[in-house]
Image: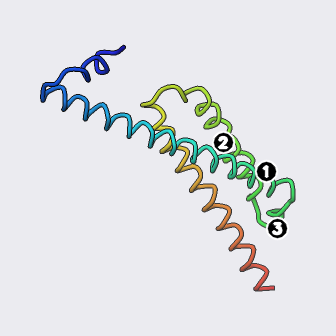
Amino acid sequence: MTDIESIRYTGDEKDDKKRYLLHQHKETDVFVKKSYWLCLILFFVSGIAMVSAITAGVYKDVILAETFIVSVLGTIYMVLFIVMVCCYGNAQLRIAILLFVSSFIGLVAGFMVGVNLKMVVSHLKE
């Protein structure tokens, strides 16, 4: 039993505040864990989207799009994947990882949407 858990059996107001802080901490931890799993799912979906776009040759018409996805986004993807696997157990690092992975997912989605729009515009010009 930790110090905070042993405090919950006393009845002082000070202990009530500590119990309330413990409850808030647990709620925050549950929120971060659920957010982490959602981010992990979106991370894998973005990886699948990148791999399927490269293997299908969707971006062959756009100059440097495939090269950018493979060299830059692929490298960042692998580094983030290793960091996510290694640092899952640390609650403080989990929050930082969430920020980085969320930014990466936004970058990948924005890049792929931008490239698709460029392809549509170039096909409309033809």
User: Which residue lies under the disc numbered 3?
Assistant: 61
Against 59, residue 29 (above or below) is above
Determine the residue positioned at 19% across, 32% down: 17
Against 113, residue 94 (above or below) is above
Name the outermost residue toward the bottom: 125
Quadrant of residue 118 in the image? bottom right
- For residue 51, which numbered disc appears in the image? 1
| 3D distance between C-alphas at marks 2 and 3 | 24 Å
Callout 2 amino acid: Tyr
Q: Are marks 2 and 1 in contact (CB under 8 Å)?
A: no
| 3D distance between C-alphas at marks 1 and 3 | 17 Å
Front residue (pair 18, 70): 18
Front residue (pair 114, 5): 5
Lateral position of residue 96 relative to residue 75, left or right: left
Mark 2, other Cα within 10 Å: few <14 / some 14–19 / many ≥20: many
Q: Quick one: quadrant of the N terminus? A: top left
Quadrant of residue 119 in the image? bottom right
Quadrant of residue 26 in the image? top left
User: Which residue lies under the disc numbered 2?
Assistant: 77
